[in-house]
Amino acid sequence: MKCPYCGYQESKVVDSRHSEDSMSIRRRRECLSCQKRFTTYETVESLPVMVVKKDNSREPFDRNKLLRGMVRACEKRPVSMADLEAVATEIEQLVQNSLDREVSTGKIGEMVMERIKPLDEVAYVRFASVYRQFKDINSFMHELNKILEEK
């Protein structure tokens, strides 16, 4: 590991611990040349997962884009950011751990909807209305009636 202060290539690990999210290891290192300390993070390298969109175009999976969509659906609703982060992390892990290197937006949307519904039904309907692209009021009412029947 190259020292950020003097550029020397050798350092020793002084302390190691898991990060708060348990997805990486935080290491405190000391340069063997200048004796200054610095922090590094070690994470597992993951292969990129491609998202297949409705028009069959592909783009890399983006956790932030997923989170932005959920935040938009939960705007002015009593859903904590921690809950949304947990849902995003769970979906990201499912996508990364699947054997497929491609996942459809439909599958991601379904995963979001089944996890957001217990958090807030209004946010669920908002997300579903964008995701399912309701064509008219009848299809929207059909979705609302399904929610009411489940209660």
Image (tube, rainbow, N blue to C red):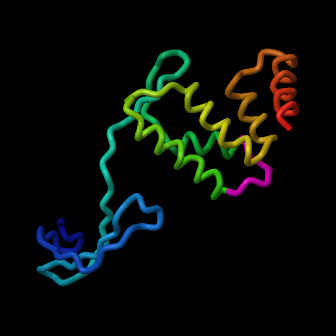
Q: Quadrant of the N terminus?
A: bottom left
What secondary structure prevails in the magenta region?
loop
Which of the 4 image quarters holds residue 82?
bottom right
Q: Which x, y percent locates residue 105? A: 55, 27
Residue 121 vertical position relative to residue 26 in the rendered view, above or below: above
Q: Quadrant of the C terminus?
A: top right
Does residue 23 show up magenta in the picture? no
Q: Which x, y percent locates residue 107? A: 56, 28
Determine whether, in the image, residue 28 is placed left or right of residue 94.
left
Q: Which x, y percent locates residue 84? A: 63, 51
Residue 151 vertical position relative to residue 53 in the rendered view, above or below: below
| Total labels drawn | 0
Magenta stretch in the rendered image: 73-80
Residue 72 vertical position relative to residue 60 in the rendered view, above or below: below
Q: Which residue lies furthest to the bottom in this view?
A: 35
Determine whether, in the image, residue 15 is placed left or right of residue 121.
left
Give me the residue at 55% from left, 18% from top: 54
Give me the residue at 38% from left, 68% from top: 18
Which of the 4 image quarters holds residue 141?
top right
